[in-house]
Image (tube, rainbow, N blue to C red):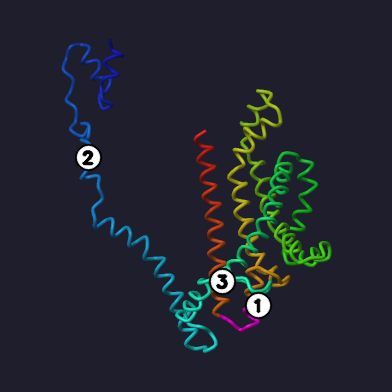
Amino acid sequence: MLKSEAQELPPAVTAADILAMNAGQPARPLPASTAAPRPASPAARRPLPGRSFSAAVKLVLPPLAGIALVVLAWQIIAARNSAFPSPLATFREALVLFADPFYRNTPNDQGIGWNVLASLKRVALGFGLAALIGIPLGFVIGRVRFAASMFGPIISLLKPVSPLAWLPIGLLVFKSADPAAIWSIFICSIWPMVINTAVGVQRVPQDYMNVARVLNLSEWKVVTKIVLPSALPYILTGVRLAIGTAWLVIVAAEMLTGGVGIGFWVWDEWNNLNVAHIIIAIVIIGVVGLLLEQALMALARALTHEQTAN
């Protein structure tokens, strides 16, 4: 009887009240603050129009203010230097440029769209090869102490080397500019993935590994069921860092190798003294890099949410 009545009482009732009820005495009245709150009406839950507008202004105003500040500085520079195009002149050039971004006259005279696609293709190939090699290598380094001792000094020695320093090696080995540029992307993308994957594998909680040892799980199950889910955030961080570095390096590599690509297009426009097109290319490079990073962040959130749900 005592147990059933205690389950029905609100949390504010003390043990003395329970004893008083069992003895037939009236329990003390509940404080007014313990009464269950009334559910809010739909009208109360609905945000006020003024608050919604204020929140939207706070969300949009800071980015617009930053853009306006950049445009103002740009206009001041253009006013002091006649060779530098103004924002309005650059916008007009952009309208002409994007009117037909996929024209193709000669191999060296193609639209901006083809140049961006050529650069993305090189980045995809170099980045994909780096992921295929770097992530498994990071797993091995994180799991096997001998491999960590063997590859650790090599990674520490080669990681600080500029990716463009590897470009002449690629030209010498592959005898062609296109694979040399892909090689530069590969060599700059592999280090973040190797290092972050190895760190993620090494930081798997020891309790998880002890449970796997007690259950006598195979190495494959340990890697797929314990190590990979725990190290996944580190792996995705390495992938994000690698894609940003790869897109950064491809522009510089294409300036040196030539051919079709956004980097070569920038250098070609500089040779033609078309500064407006260079500014447009800078904006395009930034937007594409931002979209790549946002896509990987969305993938990371999706994989992390799926892992949490499972």
Label 1 element class? helix
Distance of mark 1 from mark 3, alpha carbons? 14 Å
Which residue is depicted at the point 82% across and 65% down?
175
Q: Which mark is residue 176?
A: none
**Kind of residue at badge 3:** Ile
In the picture provided, is 26 more to the left or to the right than 250? left
Q: Residue at x 71, y 72 (%)?
A: 258
Q: Residue at x 83, y 65 (%)?
A: 172
For disc 3, the neighbor class at 10 Å (few under 14, some 14 to 19, many from 20) is some
Q: Position of residue 157 (x, y in %)?
A: 77, 58
Viewer-nearest of discs 1 and 3: 1
State the CA–CA distance, disc 2 to disc 1: 65 Å
Q: Amino acid at mark 1?
A: Asp
Q: In the picture, residue 232 is in which quadrant?
A: top right
Residue at label 1? 268
Distance from the alpha carbon under mark 2 to that under mark 3: 52 Å
Of label 2 and label 3, which has the lower sequence position? 2
User: Which span of residues is magenta-colored?
Assistant: 269-275
Question: Residue 125 at x, y = what percent?
Answer: 69, 55
Quarter of the image where the N terminus is located:
top left
Does 128 appear in magenta? no
Q: Which of the numbered marks, if any, corresponds to residue 40?
A: 2
Percent coordinates x, y for residue 71 in the rendering: 45, 76
Residue placed most toward the observer, 233 or 5: 233
The front one of 50 and 206 is 50
Q: Is residue 178 left or right of residue 52?
A: right
| Circle 1 residues within 10 Å: few <14, some 14–19, many ≥20 | some
Tell me if label 1 and label 3 are in contact, CB under 8 Å: no
Q: Which mark is residue 282?
A: 3
Q: Amino acid at mark 2?
A: Ala
In this rendering, the answer to whether 98 lies above or below 191 is below
